[in-house]
Image (cartoon, coloured by chain):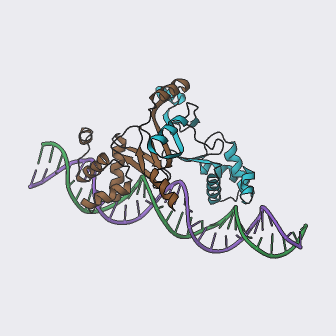
Chain colours: A brown, B cyan, C green, D purple
DNA sequence: GTCGTTAAAAATAATCGTTATTTATAAATA
DNA sequence: TATTTATAAATAACGATTATTTTTAACGAC
């Protein structure tokens, strides 16, 4: 990931390293604000705009995928930067990866039916997680 | 749809009727701005906030679904207000319905595996439509 | 149909996430 | 170490959406 930046002649700065590290290691789906708070810890003078720019840079070179949820805002994943299904709890807003069947076959079928060149897809399931189901019953 | 509003004791205003009509009849995926422009035609004094409020009202009572695309902004569908896959051309931004396989089985599988209560899902394919593929070759 | 009540519309201001701009800093290379 | 130049910092600007206040008109009772 660092090498990819170098190869493309982007400079390796501490701020970029910090953002990159957080996105690559996090198993969750941090927002820009989340990343900002973590980076701020080590680099207190960091500006929010820098996080935006770095995240967008990583997005453009394909090392990070952006997921926009109207309910919870934009989230980023540098850990598995390729299409895969998600499972979102609409109560506690937790986002999980889900490993149910892949859609390559469906993509190909769609491509041949419609003539579209399919480049990407996105599959999300929304529901209530077991924990929130229990909370609801108690209240 | 009008009856649903009446039943819930919402007033039937010309502006609401206009928004409702557009969303129920449009086969595409209009944005708030699109709806506004069309309503403005018949009701030149209409305020944009009214469109926002009406669309959100319809969304809340389940007569319209909101689709947020980071590339093309929020779009609304009052024609088929239930989950179904979409096919989006990333060049010309056209949004189509696609009728490839349904995901009920997958939903159920996921529910029993994870304990989540699945309420909704969303499946979108992104690609280049045949028309835009031809344009690209020409240019 | 008229009146009175009150929800909804209009007009406008405010908010929030994101992006653009300007100036200052520091990474890369010689 | 000095020079060049991309990047960071700070701040302003922007655009989509929402909140606020005032005005209008939908609905129900008479």
Decide: is A109 above or below B113.
above
Left or right for B61, reference A138: right
Q: Position of residue A111 (x, y in %)?
A: 51, 26
**Which residue extends farthest front?**
A138
Left or right for A8, reference B67: left
The residue that appears at 36% across and 49% down in the rendered structure is A28
Q: Position of residue A84 (x, y in %)?
A: 42, 38
Residue closer to the observer: D12 or B107: B107
**Which residue extends farthest top?**
A112
Residue closer to the observer: A115 or B123: B123
Kindly tell me whether residue B41 is visible in this rendering.
Answer: no
The residue that appears at 63% across and 48% down in the rendered structure is B64
Q: Position of residue B27 (x, y in %)?
A: 65, 39
Residue closer to the observer: B84 or A117: B84
Kindly tell me whether residue B58 is visible in this rendering.
Answer: yes
The residue that appears at 52% across and 23% down in the rendered structure is A112
Residue closer to the observer: D6 or B39: B39
Left or right for A47, reference B75: left
Q: Could you tell me how many numbered marks the image carries?
A: 0
Q: Quadrant of the N terminus of chain A?
A: top left
Q: Position of residue B28 (x, y in %)?
A: 62, 40
């Amino acid at each position: 990931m660092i090498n990819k930046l170098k190869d493309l002649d982007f400079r390796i700065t501490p701020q970029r390293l910090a953002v990159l590290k957080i996105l690559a290691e996090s198993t969750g789906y941090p927002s820009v604000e989340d990343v900002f708070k973590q980076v701020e810890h080590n680099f207190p003078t960091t500006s929010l705009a820098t996080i935006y720019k770095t995240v967008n840079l990583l997005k453009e070179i394909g090392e990070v995928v952006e997921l926009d949820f109207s309910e919870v805002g934009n989230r980023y994943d540098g850990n598995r930067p390729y299409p895969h299904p998600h499972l979102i709890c609409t109560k506690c807003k937790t986002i999980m990866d889900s490993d149910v069947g892949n859609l390559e076959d469906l993509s190909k079928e769609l491509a041949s039916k419609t003539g579209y060149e399919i480049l990407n897809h996105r599959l999300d399931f929304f529901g209530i997680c077991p924990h929130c189901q229990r909370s609801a019953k108690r209240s």
